[in-house]
Structures are given as structure tokens and as C-alpha cells.
Amino acid sequence: MMKKNKNFTLLTLIPVTIGISTIFANAKQLTFSTKIDSVCGIEIIDDSGSIDFNDTNTNDTASFKIKTNSKQGFSKINFTNINKSDNLQSENGEFIVNDSTSIKWNNPQTINVDHDEEQTVIARINKDSNQIISGDARVTTTLEIECVGN
């Protein structure tokens, strides 16, 4: 009687083993996903600089970076709300970005700025400083970012 039980047990294990190998043989795919939110903003590195005149060149710049994860890799920057101190009201100066791009105070243009590249900005008036009324000379602007492709 013992032999019969052993054989029966052996026959029962064979189908179970075949069933387990069938489960492992099938391929199943796992999927992982998440939504990546848009990033688009301005990082101010240095919020002030000096005004350069024909007779002065301080190279004391303000600077900023834009942060974006758009496919285009850049954003548009607008210089808005340009306000001048009383002694500069009649002056038509400019902001110079990266020593090359001129943003006129009386007619500011939009510029494209690449992601994570530092932008330096100086204020400049095309006159000698002794041609300006004495006192604190100041010009301020607001940087506005226009996100591209987000």
C-alpha cells in the first residue's frame, strides 16, 4: 500500500511543476509614467548694477538666468515698467545684455534667452556723466518672461 501512495504523490507533483513553469514563461510588461510639469521662470543672480556713461565704464552688471524645460530650450524676456529718476527723465538710455544686445528705454524689444545661461545687463547713457543733473541717478525695470512651448 505504501507504493501506491508514493506513485500517486509523484503524479500529482508533475502537473503542478508544469503549471509553474508556464506562469514564468509568459512575458508581462510593466509601465511607469508621470506627468512632468512645465518650468518657466527667472532666477535673479544680481539685482543691481551701475549706470555707465561715455566717461565711465564700471562693468558693474546685474544678472539673471531663465529656467525652462520646454522643448525649445529658451524663453522670451521683456523689459517692462522702465522708470527713471528725476535727473534721467529726459535721457534715452539703454540696457545692454551680454555686451551685445541693446534694449532702448524708450522702445524696449523682446529678446530670446536660452535656458540656464547667465545674462549680464548694464544700464548705459550715451553722454558724459557731467552732462547729467547731479544727484542719485537710477533706472529700474521689470523683467517679464514669456514661456515658449509650455
Image: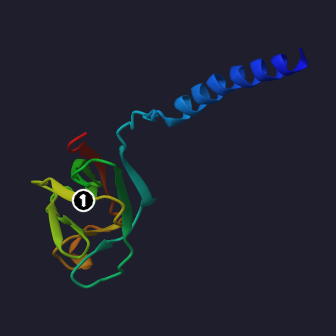
Q: Is residue 109 left or right of residue 31?
A: left
User: Residue 45 falls in which quadrant of the image?
Assistant: bottom left
43 and 91: which one is in front? Answer: 43
Residue 66, image x, y percentages? 34, 54
Q: Residue at x 23, y 76 (%)?
A: 99
Q: Residue at x 29, y 49 (%)?
A: 143
User: What is the basis of the colouring in this image?
Assistant: rainbow
Q: Is residue 8 left or right of residue 103?
A: right
Residue 124, image x, y percentages? 23, 71
User: Residue 23 falls in which quadrant of the image?
Assistant: top right
The kind of residue tagged 1 is Val
Residue 118, image x, y percentages? 36, 66
User: Residue 64 falls in which quadrant of the image?
Assistant: bottom left
Residue 3, image x, y percentages? 85, 21
Vertical comparison of 26 with 117: above or below: above
Total of numbered circles in the picture?
Answer: 1
64 and 80: which one is in front? Answer: 64
Task: Quickly name the residue at label 1.
Answer: 113
Q: Residue at x 34, y 65 (%)?
A: 117
Residue farthest toward the right in the current orientation of the protein: 2
Q: Secondary structure at mark 1?
A: strand
Residue farthest toward the top in the current orientation of the protein: 1
Location of the C terminus by quadrant is top left
Q: Is residue 11 left or right of residue 150?
A: right
Vertical comparison of 13 with 143: above or below: above
Disc 1 crowd rating (10 Å Cα; few below 14, some 14-19, many 20+) is: some
Q: Is residue 126 left or right of residue 61?
A: left
3 and 126: which one is in front? Answer: 3
